[in-house]
Image (cartoon, rainbow, N blue to C red):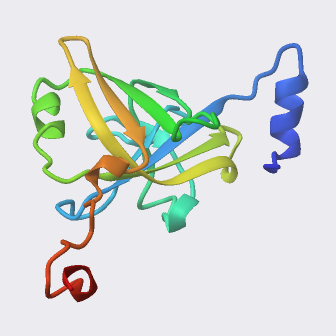
Amino acid sequence: MRRVSLNARLAQDAASTDAIDVALFHIEHPSLDEPIRLSTDPGERISMDPLSYGTRSNWLGADPYTEPYLFILASAELPGDQDDAPAAAALVLENVDADLVGLLRSFTDRPTVHMAVVLASSPDVIEVEYHGLKIVGADGNAGEISLQISRAPIEDEAAPMDSFTKERFPGMFR
């Protein structure tokens, strides 16, 4: 059973509420100098020049003042808990930069994504989190970019691991 804070539980049970769910994304890749931190809530002004908004949270050891989660125009679909399918999520970004699709498709190995849901009123209290997901697909058009996030595909694993040769398995060649 997953633990849910009292504030989140009250917000879920209320007929109407002012509590806002916020999805935080932490994207890592060896070619990045530092992780990309993204938020779905423009809760606080981060800087004036350039004008940017975001969420200040200490999730995954981030310093809230120097490493905020920057606001993006996005919608998120959280990973499901189906028995016969891996946890899969989707992140749909508004396409505000024409070069973003090319950048997302230029990776040869998959970036790692960590995902958390918090309340805007308490961004340091994690309601649910998912670690070690991979970006397994990126599709885009003139209006939006859709990132498919899941566990690393089992199809990428080498199988069979060993070759059945005389040197490796001498008992088979007697």
Residue sitting farthest toward the front:
174
Q: Position of residue 126 (x, y in %)?
A: 68, 51
Return the residue nearer the eye: 102 or 33. Answer: 102
**Is 47 placed left or right of 49 in the picture?**
right
Asked if 162 appears above or below 54 in the picture, the reply is below
Q: Position of residue 21 (x, y in %)?
A: 65, 32
Asked if 4 appears above or below 94 in the picture, the reply is below
Return the residue nearer the eye: 42 or 39. Answer: 39
Return the residue nearer the eye: 121 or 163. Answer: 163
The residue lying at 10 percent from left, 42 percent from top is: 106
In the rendered image, which quarter contains the C terminus?
A: bottom left
The residue lying at 17 percent from left, 26 percent from top is: 97
Return the residue nearer the eye: 80 or 130. Answer: 80
**Is 129 placed left or right of 170 in the picture?**
right
Count of numbered badges drawn on the protein:
0
Q: Position of residue 146 (x, y in %)?
A: 32, 24
Q: Position of residue 33 (x, y in %)?
A: 21, 64
The residue lying at 43 percent from left, 48 percent from top is: 151
Res 120 quadrant in image: top right
The residue lying at 22 percent from left, 64 percent from top is: 30
